[in-house]
Every structure is written in C-alpha cells, then in structure tokens.
Image: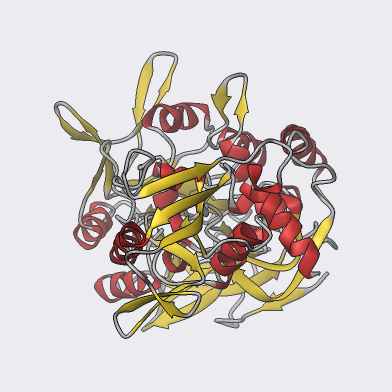
Amino acid sequence: MKFIKIIVASFFLCTACTKDDGRIDFTFLQLNDVYEIAAIQGGEFGGMARVETVHQELLKENKNTMLFMAGDFLSPSLLGTLKVGGNRVGGKQMVEVMNAMNFDLVAFGNHEFDIPKKDLQERLNESNFPWISANVQLKTADGAVPFYKEIAGEKRAVNETFIQEFIDEDGTAIKVGFISVCIPSNPKEFVQYGDMYQRVKASHAALKGKVDVVFGLTHVKLENDKKIAVLLPNLPLIMGGHEHENSLNFVGDVQIAKADANAKTVYIHRISYDKKTKKTFVVSELREINSQIKEDKKVGQIVRKWQTILTSKIRETIHNPTDIIYTTAIPLDGRDTPIRNVQTNLGQVITEAMSFSYQDEIDCALVNGGSVRIDDQLTGNITAVSIFRVLPYGGAILKVKIKGSLLQRVLEYGDSAAGTGAYLQRFNAEKLDGNWQIKKELLDLDKTYTVAFSEYLLKGFDISFLSGANEGVLEIYTPSETELAYDIRKGVISYLKAKE
C-alpha cells in the first residue's frame, strides 16, 4: 500500500493507563469533493468501498474515530443526472453509500445546491448523518430558516455547530466542537448565504464554555480558510474542501488540510489533547486510496448496484463503456472555474471533436462551458464513462449556417459571460487585438459561416437571442441517430479513439 505521509507534529501520547491521565487521543478521517462512489481512472484510484476499509482499520486502532465530508458530494456526477423510476438520481446513490459508511459529520458544499430544492430535501431526509452549517439557510416566505431533515413528520434543524464527546479507556473525557461555513458561489432562489466570516466567528463564540477544543469543517477557497485561521487562531485544524488538489497549509498554529477530489486521497488526522495544558497536537497523514486497498464488502455491494444501473444506461448509447479510449499525459481541465472563464485543453478536445463529427467541414465549433459538469481534471486512462461524466446531458451537435454578424454577436456574448455557464469553449475562433478571427482570418460580417453548435446553445437558454427564430440563423442541420454528431459524447469518444 502506497502512503503519502506529512508529519505536522511528532507528539503521540499513550493512553494505556488505568487511571485518568488527562490525556486523550482521537482520529479524524477527512474526505472532500467526492462525486464518484466508484473507483476512477480505470479503477486505479478512489472508491468509497476502499475508503470504508481504511475507516474500519482506523476504528480498530482507536474507537474514537470520526468520518467527515467537507462538502460537495451530492453533485455533480454522471449517476446523479440519470433517471431511475422517472426521477433524477440527484445524489441518492451517494447518500446511500455514506449511510452505510456511518459518516459522523458533513458540511454543505456549493454543489449541494446544484440539485433542485425538492431533491435536496429528499437527500437530507434520507441521510442518517448530521449536517452542519453556520452560513447557509433555507429561504422561505417567512424569511431564512435552517435547512432541516423531516423524519416521521418531525422537522429537525441543521445546526450551526456540532459537539462530540470522546472518552478513552482510562476515563479521560473531553467535548470537541465543530464549526462550518460554505462558499457563497452557487446562488439559488431557495438558499440564503450569510457572511462566512461573521457567521464562523459567531458559531465559534457560541461554543465557548461548552467544549474543550474546536475544529473547522469548511467548504471555501483556501484564501478564505486562511482568513478564518487569522480570525480564529486557536483552531488546531481546519478540514477544508472546494479545491480538488491536496494541500497542507499553516497560518500561525492553525493547520488547513484538503484532500484530493473523488477520494484519490484522504487525510487521516491523529490528534492528542492534554486537558491539563489544554494543548492539542495533530499528526496528519495523506493516504492514497488505490487498487492495493481491498474494498469493504457491504459498501462495495451498494456501489456495484449503482454501477450496474449506470452501465446499463450508458450502453443505451455506446457499447463497452469501460474500455480505455485514450491516455493523456497532461490533465484535461474540466474544473468549473477554468471551463467557465478561459479556454481549456478539455474545451479544445470537445470542440475539435465537434468539428471531427462533421469531417471538419465546418468553419468553427462552439460549446457552452456550463455543459461540462465534471468539475475535475481527466488524468491518465480515459474511458467512455469518463466522457459521460464530462458531458452527462449529451445532446446533438448541430451544423448551422449563420450570418457573420450574428456569429460575432454570439462570440462577443460568450466572451462577456466569463464566470458563467454561457462562456464559450471554441475551436477555430479566437480574438486577437480586439478582433474575432475564424480559421485565422478576420471575421466577415457579411459572410455565411458553417458552425458546429452544441444543441443546448440553439435553444436560447444561455444566449437568449441564439435560436432558430433569429433571422441570422439561415439553416440548422440536425443529425440522425445513425450519425456521429447525434450525441456529442459519441463524437468526443470517436475523436479521442482516432487520436490514440
């Protein structure tokens, strides 16, 4: 088993005494930004059944072990977009797995609000684990109230803080408090975001006198975590999320830890607390979750059930979905922030594939960044399932004859929409010195261009004036089911196979 270990303190205490020695050890197992319940990258990394094996090992080592999720687990995922029994899965698969793993505490992430209010409420109701947040609330006609679970008709509010009591074999007992905030980057009509700094300070103050020590469980940018560490310098540890790459940072005595997305790694924090000195010592280990770790049988069975559903649905579109179609040496970037703000190599692959689907008999190709839902990077071996994760909603590639004047308006709109899903990933269309070029030639307002568009764009959802009703749209060709362009995912898969 491969380990990546980072030692942040080399202090470990023995608790094998029969008399209360005022010292206690406990362990935190931290995950964040987990969208896939199964292993990824051809089965090499991740997988919640493997994480559960590590969890059980830690519980045997120390019964005072807690399992955490620092936000972003209900969405986005390919499974979540599928319909089963007429309803979107919408994170149901993740809650079922996490229930089986007995998570001890979870934080809201910004992606929890991707799914509709009704679906989020169902996931809350289904969850057997406690949620925590100091700055996200449910908007109602009577004002903002805490989110809640509804069980047997009883509403149980999500608390701003959480308290856990630990007792060791010699009788040492302490109370540990937790605080949490979420980044306000996903505005929804049913969500009220409070100021993260004001709320985290208030929730920390609310725990004063009630606990021995307080830890953070957050889902914010690293820069936000660092500011929280300045505001609350007595926090020994902030278990964070949002960034998808592991990191360990210090602000004074505050440690900020983030694991890799999709459980490629987890953080194990072995913590010692001295009741006499009131000092906390943290030993952190970044452990890689890979194929050398056996899967837990109970969790593995649930994962396989959902993977069978997934494979069955994908096979309706493409055979052999788990075959490796391409191997990339450079990560293909589908993370939300880049794909909605700048041209990325994954956006280039998708738009090149759109052109490829029409034998490159087009002038340029455009796709809205918001159609890329993976919020991750593709690395190593890529399968058809990987592409379905990138573009879960599919849709056709349309071949459109469009006036140059309208094409320029579309390009300008996409450029100005940076930061939103309407930002356009482009092929053969670039802006140089303030002027748009198509195939390296200055865009001609009077010329008719042939452009490959994602089907979604021509519905006018992201760019309201772009539809068949616009007089600048001269002709729309919709591919038949037998054509490569019928499903953008098939186009990308075929393109990558050809490149390989």
Res. 437 image quadrant: bottom left
On screen, residue 436 versus residue 333, left or right, reads: left
Residue placed farthest to the top in the image?
A: 153
Res. 176 image quadrant: bottom left
Q: Nearer the viewer, residue 274 or 449?
A: 449
**Image position, residue 52 (x, y; %):** 72, 49
On screen, residue 258 versus residue 492, left or right, reads: left
Q: Is residue 258 visible?
A: yes
Identify the image quadrant of the N terminus: bottom right
**Image position, residue 67 (x, y; %):** 58, 51
Residue placed farthest to the left in the image?
A: 142
On screen, residue 39 versus residue 421, left or right, reads: right
**Image position, residue 377 (x, y; %):** 60, 66
| Residue at (75, 33) in percent of width and height | 316
**Image position, residue 14 (x, y; %):** 65, 70
- Is the residue 353 above or below the residue 59 in the image? below
Res. 144 image quadrant: top left
- Is the residue 108 above or below the residue 328 in the image? above
Colour pattern of the rendering: secondary structure
Identify the image quadrant of the C terminus: bottom right
Q: Is residue 13 visible?
A: no
| Residue at (81, 50) in percent of width and height | 322
On screen, residue 461 versus residue 144, left or right, reads: right
Q: Nearer the viewer, residue 349 or 201?
A: 349
